[in-house]
Image: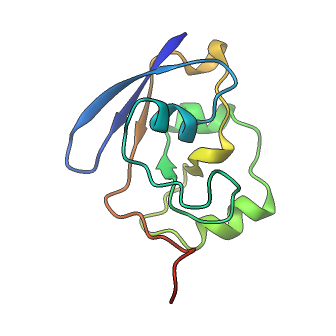
Amino acid sequence: HGNVFFVSADGQEWQAEARTAQTLLEVAHNNDIEVEGACGGECACSTCHMILSEEIFDQLPEMDEDEEDMLDLALEVTETSRLGCQVRLLKSRHEDMTIQLPSDCIDQLGDW
């Protein structure tokens, strides 16, 4: 067990209990943090877009094309943006990490 901290765009902060091998989206949902994840963690929407520190981002495996395509649909994408459903926690590198939540998550599964 370890902790992950989620910070909203308006500065609200939540401490979440996390376990190794969970995705960031699972951690958020298990701790009642409102991250949508409209597609259920299948990398088929951009609603679990999260912004990581450069230090954490650089330690992660590279994102695949599907994740890149979905992030293209998200707002407020940064150099260190990832989809929460695609980032699995490893105890060695994710203890007490802080995740920034963008102010506006757009559901790309809905009707347009």
Whether residue 112 is situated above or below residue 16 in the rendered picture: below
The location of residue 25, given as percent across then percent down, is 55, 41
Please tell me in which quadrant of the rendered image residue 45 appears: bottom right
Foreground residue, 35 or 55? 35
Q: Say if 76 sits above or below 9 in the image.
A: below
Image point (49%, 62%), residue name = 77
Which residue: 64% across, 26% down? 89
Q: Residue furthest right?
A: 64
| Residue depicted at x 48% and y 31% | 30
Q: Tell me: residue 48, above or below residue 54.
A: below
Percent position (x, y) of residue 106?
Answer: 44, 70
Q: Quadrant of the N terminus?
A: top right
Identify whether 73 is placed above or below 34. Answer: below
Instruction: Estimate the x, y position of residue 103 in percent, counting from the top left.
Output: 31, 59
Q: Residue furthest bottom?
A: 112
State left or right for residue 88 relative to residue 94: right
Q: Residue at x 26, y 33 (%)?
A: 13
Q: Is 37 situated left or right of 35 in this image?
A: right
Color scheme of the displayed model: rainbow
Q: Measuring from the top left, give residue 76's x and y in whole percent.
A: 42, 65
The number of numbered discs placed on residues in the rendered structure image is: 0
In this rendering, position of residue 15 left or right of residue 39: left
Q: In this rendered view, identify the residue nearer to me: 102 or 47.
A: 47
